[in-house]
Image: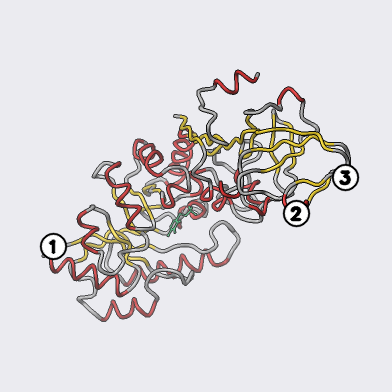
Amino acid sequence: MQQDALQAGRTGRAGALLKIDLKALRNNYRLLRGKLGNAQCGAAVKADAYGLGAIRVSRALVEEGCRHLFVAHLEEAITLRPHVAEHVAIYVMHGSPVGYEAEFLEHRCIPVLNSREQIAGWRKLAEANNKQLPAIIQLDTGMSRMGLSAQEVQAWLADPDFIRGISLQYLMSHLACAENQQHPMNRQQLQAFTALRAQLPACGASLANSSGIFLGPDFHFDLARPGAALYGVAPVAGHDNPMQAVAHLQGRIIQTREIAAGTGVGYSLTWRCTRPSRIATVAVGYADGWLRSLSNRGVAHIGGIAAPMVGNVSMDTITLDVSDVPLAQLYPGALVDLISATNGVDQVAERAATIGYEILTSLGLRFEREYLD
Ligand SMILES: *Cc1c(COP(=O)(O)O)cnc(C)c1O
């Protein structure tokens, strides 16, 4: 048993093993593309593809036919650019920081222009280069975060030179409440987007994130930008998750101990056992993105048996009550399931009082990573 776990092609040097299932990622992409009909299925690969590795993830998605990748920062786009084919567009959702416009040309990435300043900067670069430069323009349809307001769109309509030199690829907007299918804001934003588009130059349109795809064809337009659902996060609140799990996290047991009834565990002794107990210390902590809010709330599984996390999460360790787990499974180096098919990112998130997005994007850099494809 011990031998098997240690010999499964892993070094054992790291405190945890993060398995990233690219087959599941590919299946998720196909499922979303299937729902989209004729609309293109792009992908949000910002934040290192939600912590799962933007280069590996992007390559797999491009093999599946994805031609539109979205990151947040210019820096992310520059890192990714050499790793994906030139015919794949990389869009920077934050647009250009002032003064960095020329780097978009140099690195062949496309800005999402969110403000009049960003549009002016891109127009100036087009003028200086004497050519049409591609861009997406974002419109704010109610989230009040990014994009031109309805008033700024009026200024655009009044100024024939507003996008001079800009080859407008898509108009885009972002939904604030899409995971809640009943929310009236979804239709309101759809109407606002449609009304603004009708006044603006004809071009492609992009509205839906993961959850937006599940709101139906009215929300699909020409290009969708799913992120979370590709990585296994449930796209529709209160419904079964149709996506396959992509991230599987297993931590390694460092040591186990027997403690007498009444003994405290961990910093500040926030948990005390009421019966004689066996405690396993596992080499994952909040420095690995195992959020401290999981203290006394999280659960691990060992051979399918639940082992509650007891005591506070430390920087580098958690402690589990493994009293109900057969001794044969509790040896130094044994792997315990922290994110698994039975206890997915959304369940972990619920226990941590957050969302699956934050669990994924917090995943640490100290894990040994294994890509399955
Ligand atoms: C992050 C992001 C997406 C992807 O959203 P998911 O909910 O992860 O599918 C799409 N569009 C914009 C503007 C974003 O910021």
103 relative to 45 in the view: left or right: left
Q: How many angstroms separate mark 1 from mark 3 (CA)?
A: 75 Å
Q: What residue type is labelled 1?
A: Lys
- Quadrant of the snapshot with the N terminus: top right
Q: Residues within 10 Å of mark 3 (few under 14, many from 20)?
A: few
Mark 2 or mark 1: which comes first in sequence? 1
Residue that numbered label 3 is attached to: 262
Q: Position of residue 330 (x, y in %)?
A: 71, 27
Write the residue at 32% across / 72% down: 199
Q: On screen, 97 above or below 105?
A: below
Residue that numbered label 2 is attached to: 268
Dot 2 falls on a residue whose secondary structure is: helix
Q: Which of 361 and 254 is in front in this view?
A: 254
Q: Which amino acid does label 2 sit on?
A: Ser
15 relative to 28 in the view: left or right: right
191 relative to 77 in the view: left or right: right
Mark 1 or mark 3: which comes first in sequence? 1
Residue that numbered label 1 is attached to: 131
- Quadrant of the snapshot with the C terminus: top left
